[in-house]
Amino acid sequence: MATDSTAVGAIRNRGPLEGVRPAFDLIARQRVLFTILFLVVLPWLAPYKALAVNILIFGLFAMGFNLVYGYAGMLSFGHAALFGLGAYGCGVPIAKFGFPWYVALPLGVLIATTAGVVIGWFATRSRGIYFAMVTLALSQVVYYVVYQSIWLTGGEDGLRGVSVPSISLFGIAEFNLLDPTTKYYLILIIIILALWIFSRILASPFGAILEGLRENEKRAAACGYDVNRTRWFAFVLSSVFSGLAGALYAIHLSVVPIETLHYFTSAVVLMMTLLGGMGTFFGPFVGALVYLLLQDVVSVITVHWQLVVGCLFVLLILFFPRGIWGSLMHWLRI
Amino acid sequence: MTLDLFLLQLFTGLALGSIYVLVALGLSLIFGLLTIVNFAHGQFFMLGAYVGAFTLGFTGNFWLSLIVVPIVVGGIGMLCERFLVRPLYGRGIDYPLLLTYGLGLILLELVRIIAGTQGVPFNTPRLLAGAVDLHFFFFPKYRLFLIFATAVILLALWILLEKTSYGLIIRAGARDQEIVQVLGVDIGRVWLIVFGIGVAIAGIAGVLAAPIRGVFPEMGVPVLVEAFVVTVVGGMGSLLGAVIAGLLVGVTFSFTSFFYPEMATLSMFVLMALVLVFRPRGLFGRAGVLG
Amino acid sequence: MAVKLSRRKLLATAGAAAAMSSFKINVARSQETPIKIGFPVPISGPYGTEANDQVRCAQLAIDWFNQESPRKAELVVRDDKLDPGEAATRTLELIESDKVDFICGSLSASVQLSVNQVASKRGVIYNSISQSDSINEASDFTKYTFHEALNPHMTAGAVARYVFGQAKGKKVAYLIADYAYGHEMQRGFRRVASEMGMEEVAEVRHPLGTTDYSAFFPRIQAARPDILLVVNFGRDQLNTLKQATDFGLKEQMQIVYPVLLDTQRIAGGFDPFEGVIGGANYYWTLEDEFESAKRLNDAYRAKYPDQGVPSAYGALGYAGVYGILKGVKEAGSIKTDEVIAAMESMKYDAYKGEQYFRKCDHQAVQSVLIIKAKPESEMRNQWDIFEILDTQPADEKFLRTCEELGHKA
């Protein structure tokens, strides 16, 4: 970046860590690359590999959620339905019908997306808190329907038998999914693809419209954009990512607990997004990382980890509404 | 279904609905004036039950706890409003919602730490124990008391809102905050008291429900969702809506439990979804109130 | 020559000595790595009290083993937060990161099934201490799966046989929580009911976590049963009993539960439970009858003087870990297949007499206690909350047959 001799430039260059600024600018431009680099080393940083996989999965889930909340400005309480249907949609074919993973995974995404189309259509007709209520009500309906379909889903006992012990690619290479490291890197590949697609979406005109909608809805409408349809589309896209995350979760744990559909899961992904910073690219991943690590570490120290999480949450809302990553970015920009 | 069975289910539904009404009332009150969705509302319900249990344990007097509970719980609520919620004014509807969610987590865990995870006993007071012969059927005395107590509280609230000047300020503030401020009223003080009242009502609901549901830390969790269903059906911000919808949901639950019990909880959500799709503002809500 | 020989001899001796000492070092080191038993239980959340008692009692089993063994055992406790997803993650951690040799634990049915799935796929023995019928079934069973706890079928059967035998009339009503545990218990009850010629007059299924049961009572009362079989758990159990007492149900019918929770009775006050009959895996007064119960109780009292006596759930924690360690003792090694073989063939007495694991589904064949809640006036001290009415002996005939569960003979 060329040095700026105007007043604005003077203000901008007066921030802390000036020497590091070029580095952060680089990161911002190559955000996908740096995310990937970080994630590659994550298994060696995290306490254990299974947790690292959870971070990947929930990071993706939170990213999908962020599309709706951070970028489109709609607070959803129903994303558990999308995540859970992705999980069941992938798990049931494997466990009950013996489908191979490369059929079940897209199937899970498809089922979640279909749900996103339906729920999104109903929800985007409302605004604000009503949007949230519709998503909550509809996701609870999904929960109960799945819960009662015991013959298919295992109901309250959860779905067991989602067993993918190994993956062979075109008969050439055989990967053992029971080995935690292999499992992590295989899932990472899928996540990287998803991240890349997400980045492309945000950089596209659609991404710009979405942000415009969030900033000033009336103006966007005045410019001729169909607000409802855009929101609906954002919701559907979000369900693709959330569903993919769910499908991966099923393969990772080899079970699908009914709790994935419960509204508490919706609350958790919201917390992660907020922790990290909504409306930023990295934010949800950072949020998922911090939340899961915190939960893990705090659980060892005290039984009352929920108190710590609650306090953290309150402090964030009061003092760091941009979330950890968002605040960091904001602070560094100034 | 015979007449006496019908009446029994109806009365049961009314008793059940009474708790819904009280909780939804508080939620709606807070929303109507402060435009805040109080996600900690269920935990204040739980607090009310605990405060009541402790008062009962100390004094042995149930009636005393009915007086102590709203004061204590309302007080805690006011502290929360003043120091946690107030700073978020103007930041949009999400922030207070999320803050109260975190607050709810904190309250729940604090109670677990202070009072243990098992819960504390709360027996039906002697005077109200047993059943009364209502000619058609036997009905527990305590539930009749519950319906009666709810009616009394509703009456008191109505008098406060309609017949006192303070109530006038509250109603005006819900209608248009800026004008009220221009007229010289300290709106902050009004918010404080309304939040306190809303939360206090939830607390009373908790102590009233305690002999029926027991007292344990998680008791407030389902209550919040139930309250949402009721306020959505009745209309967010409408007190009459909270009352009618509360009783409606209670009676619906009661009759669904009779004919098709597995679907009883689901029926609440289906009702909520239907209302949201076909009449988003609820039965009595004002159009365009939210978002 | 003499010099060479002596040097060679010296070297040989030195070499032999070195080899011996390194052998000793190796042996000593392998003696030092403790045998690790992973123990995921819901420490945080509503069943924290039960889970903590399970941990306490499990530790007693470890102590018992360590007293007599040169190689020590160690409990690795994790909080599964009563969530199957969390439990699966924790199990992965225990196996991959902590490298545990065995796993025991869980309180809820869905959690144990989740742990079982993860553990068995990785070849780790899992001894479940959570009640469930599903874990016996062929679809969830693997050779690594063991089930120490009672299953609903056994418990419901035992209670039903006693209660129906004593009942004044033949009419039975059911109030069932609508989830797996409820259905499994109901199935167990129904089988005995049809064997003994009882008449089912009402069946009500309520959603899990219902707080207000008043909506369900009128239908039950209208059917005029002699016995009301209620199947729900924890808080739900307490709330149902409170409200049933309020509605006067106890005067009209005998209320029966398949499993009565001692912890709930203590927490919820004594009135609601009074007069209710139910089943249990353990009650501390068994020490009058069984040496092993006395051993457990004494160890508990010695190590945890403020806690009173082991609860039924705690005893399960003890028995689960005891079963694994007894297998290790019998096998003389920790190699999985050898321990499995030992556990399949051994007879063991954990706390209430002889038990063994049935071969086809590794279900612990054990006795079931029938207990009744004492009125407060008859309690001699704060722990004297139940009286044991009867015991159904340990016998395979009270379980579902292997064929029925889908196991090939």
Image (cartoon, helix red, strand yellow):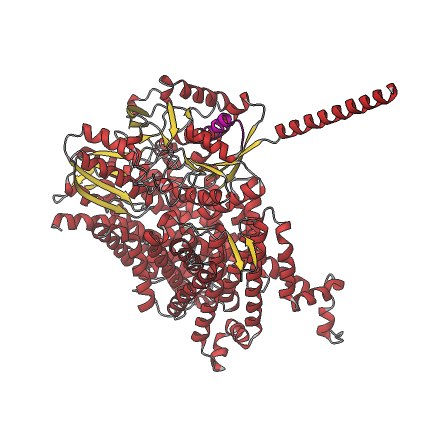
Residue, x 25% and y 34% (percent of image)? Answer: C256
Looking at the image, residue A115 lies above or below residue B5: below
Q: Looking at this view, is C211 or C120 the one in front? A: C120
The C terminus of chain B - image quarter: bottom left
Looking at the image, residue B188 lies above or below residue A3: above
Q: Where is residue C353 in the image (x, y as percent from the top left)?
A: 37, 22
Exactly how many numbered labels are in the figure?
A: 0
- Tell me where residue C362 sits by quadrant: top left
Q: Is residue C182 magenta?
A: no
Q: In this view, does C384 lie to the left or right of B86?
A: left
Q: Looking at this view, is C158 or C252 the one in front? A: C158
Q: Looking at this view, is A116 or B117 the one in front? A: A116
Q: Looking at this view, is A289 or B269 the one in front? A: A289
- Tell me where residue C146 sits by quadrant: top left
Q: Position of residue A116 (x, y in %)?
A: 42, 66
Q: Is residue C332 magenta?
A: yes
Q: Position of residue A120 (x, y in %)?
A: 41, 68
Q: Where is residue A321 in the image (x, y as percent from the top left)?
A: 56, 59
Q: Is residue C221 left or right of residue A162?
A: left
Outermost residue on the front side: it is: C1
Looking at the image, residue C41 lies above or below residue A22: above
Q: Give the range drawn in magenta.
A: C322-334
Dominant secondary structure (helix, strand or loop) of the stretch shown in magenta: helix
Q: Can residue A107 be seen in this view?
A: yes
Q: Can residue A315 be seen in this view?
A: no
